[in-house]
Image: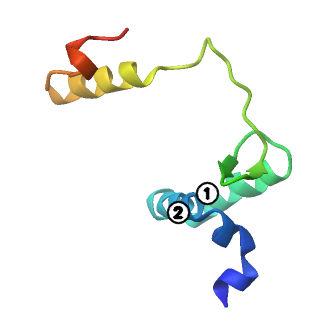
Amino acid sequence: MENEKKPLRQAMPAVAGWIDELRDAFGAQAVDAAIRAGLDGQPTFHAREAGHEVGTPIPYDPDKAVSLATLIDIGHVRTGQAATHPKGRRHG
């Protein structure tokens, strides 16, 4: 019955699972408010899966972008572990 009421949950199961995890971590009220705002045209929520797309795309700003390699390095600095990269190379 639940899936009949929520066709996007059925069509976008990975996104639905991720949203469930966000609700657990940050509270349903905050997450649901961001989703509603994204559906209303604000750049607060956007998701794509299996040809389905909902929300409002968030404009890409290269000046604010951070590479995954940088995030990995930051995480290793905080934990004190050495960062490893594919084929032993550091990417910067």
Which quarter of the rendered picture does the C terminus lie within? top left
- State if disc 2 and disc 1 touch (CB < 8 Å): yes
Query: Foreground: 28 or 68?
Result: 68
Callout 2: SS: helix
Residue 38 drawn above or below residue 79: below
Q: Position of residue 73 (x, y in %)?
A: 29, 20
Amino acid type of the residue that numbered disc 1 sits on in the rendered structure = Val
* Residue that carries the numbered disc 2 in the rendered image: 23
Which residue of the protein is positioned furthest toward the bottom in this rendering?
A: 1
Callout 1: SS: helix
How many neighbours does mark 2 have within 10 angstroms: few (below 14), some (14-19), or many (20 or more)? Answer: some
How many neighbours does mark 1 have within 10 angstroms: few (below 14), some (14-19), or many (20 or more)? Answer: some
- Per the model, the C-alpha gap separating discs 1 and 2 is 6 Å
Which residue of the protein is positioned furthest toward the left in this rendering?
A: 81
Q: Position of residue 30 (x, y in %)?
A: 61, 57
Q: Based on the displayed image, in which of its 4 quarters is residue 69 positioned? A: top left
Q: Position of residue 14 (x, y in %)?
A: 54, 59
Question: What residue lies at 72% left-to-right and 76% top-to-bottom?
Answer: 6
Amino acid type of the residue that numbered disc 2 sits on in the rendered structure = Arg
Judged left or right of residue 17, residue 54 is right
* Residue that carries the numbered disc 1 in the rendered image: 31
